[in-house]
Amino acid sequence: MKLSTDRILTTHCGSLPRPKNLLDLMKIKLCGGPHDPAAFHNCVKGAVSESVGQQVSCGIDIPTDGEQGKPGFFAYVRERLNGFEPDPGFKFPRFEAETQAFPEYYAEYMGQAMLGGAVASIAPLVCTGPVTYRGQEAVHRDIEILEAALDGWAHEEAFLPSVAPSGVGFNRYYRTEEEYAHAVAVAMNHEYRAITDAGLVVQLDDPFLTEIFSRPSLTPAERRNTAGMWIEALNYSLRGIPPEKVRFHTCYGINEGPRIYDAPLADIAECMLQINAGAFSFEAANPRHEHEYHLWETVKLPEGKALIPGVITHASNIVEHPELIAERIIRYARLVGRERVIAGADCGFSSQATYKPEIHPAIVWEKFRAMAEGARLASRRLWP
């Protein structure tokens, strides 16, 4: 994994808005309509090529495919794992404390802001049989498309996001949650290995870690135990993969909202740092979390690890000023070392394929330009 050896590098969390022509084809495919797989593949290839070019042109040093061919950050595993079925009627608690405190707001938010423009309704996946991996062709297709898109563009390295075991689905088959977690970990190891064997960094997307620590129905001990089970499964899924080929991302699953019940990073950091990853990406620009850089005054970042704090947020259409971005970067650099800080975003800008992303696509690119300029300002001050 490239570190900021002589300047602050820039990256982001993965998902980016998809073009309308791709969304149209994806909607037909997801709704079971007649579609041409070759046409869909070519459309994804074109969208990734365009996305990578825009990322690099805006100053992103470590780009990705923008998750252009995926309907959502976790729903894509339906085509990669055996043993799961969608269940539209399955109800699971999300943002319990938040939705209880602000029911009117979140009823509207969940119904419109997140789903109003979605290409298709995405039902939760439930495990109804033995979990095995069958996504070899799909993940290699992702890799080939990204590698082709990177050709000719200057970049430090590239990454591909993949969902962590905790986000795959819900167990209705295995006797215990531990057995289920282990089975998912074994299956997802195939995807993680394919990505890293291709020379790319794998990013593990895990907003469910923060979800665990935000559940009012669990005691603090139950939260730690539940998180520990999934971290053990995640580390097992990374067996044989060097930590420096892995970056871990967690966030809170909400874009614009009150966010007063977000679990503090202090509750999560100890568990997060147990993950066998080389870098850790988390929300740090959001106003509910910006102050949490102070945590690294007392929590020691293990040797060989790096931080990817969000220095731009996915929860506002305001473009951050480069001077503020530079300040955010320098705060972390002074605490953990300039080489161990990579500038990132709080979360993805379109975690679900939708015609109505909360952040307008043109503003996403402007945020990236601001981040790149902020990184340049910070670099001049950190490497005088």
Image: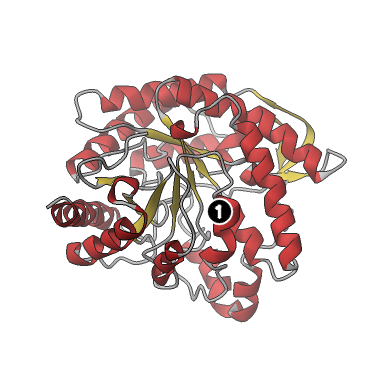
Q: Is residue 218 left or right of residue 317?
A: right
Compare residues 289 and 240 and report the one nearer the observer.
240
Q: Is residue 184 left or right of residue 351?
A: right
Give the amino acid at mark 1: Pro
- State how the image is colored: secondary structure
Compare residues 39 and 167 and report the one nearer the observer.
167
Residue 156 seen in render: yes
Q: Is residue 22 left or right of residue 276?
A: left
Q: Is residue 298 above or below residue 83?
A: below
Q: Is residue 76 above or below residue 384?
A: above
Q: Quadrant of residue 320?
A: bottom left
| Helix, strand or loop for disc 1 | loop
Residue 382 x, y percent position in the rendering: 19, 54
Residue 127 x, y percent position in the rendering: 76, 39
Q: Is residue 212 above or below residue 156?
A: below
Q: How many marks?
A: 1
Q: Is residue 111 left or right of residue 81?
A: left
Q: Quadrant of residue 319?
A: bottom left
The residue at 69%/62% (across/down) is 93
The residue at 35%/27% (across/down) is 146
Compare residues 63 and 308 and report the one nearer the observer.
308
Question: Mark 1 — residue?
Answer: 207
Compare residues 304 and 376 and report the one nearer the observer.
304
The residue at 28%/54% (across/down) is 364
The residue at 53%/24% (across/down) is 193
Q: Is residue 231 above or below residue 114?
A: above
Residue 171 x, y percent position in the rendering: 77, 44
- Tell me if mark 1 has few (under 14), some (14-19) or many (20+) residues whose alpha carbon lies within 10 angstroms of its own: many
**Quadrant the N terminus occupies:** top left
Residue 92 seen in render: no
Residue 251 x, y percent position in the rendering: 50, 57
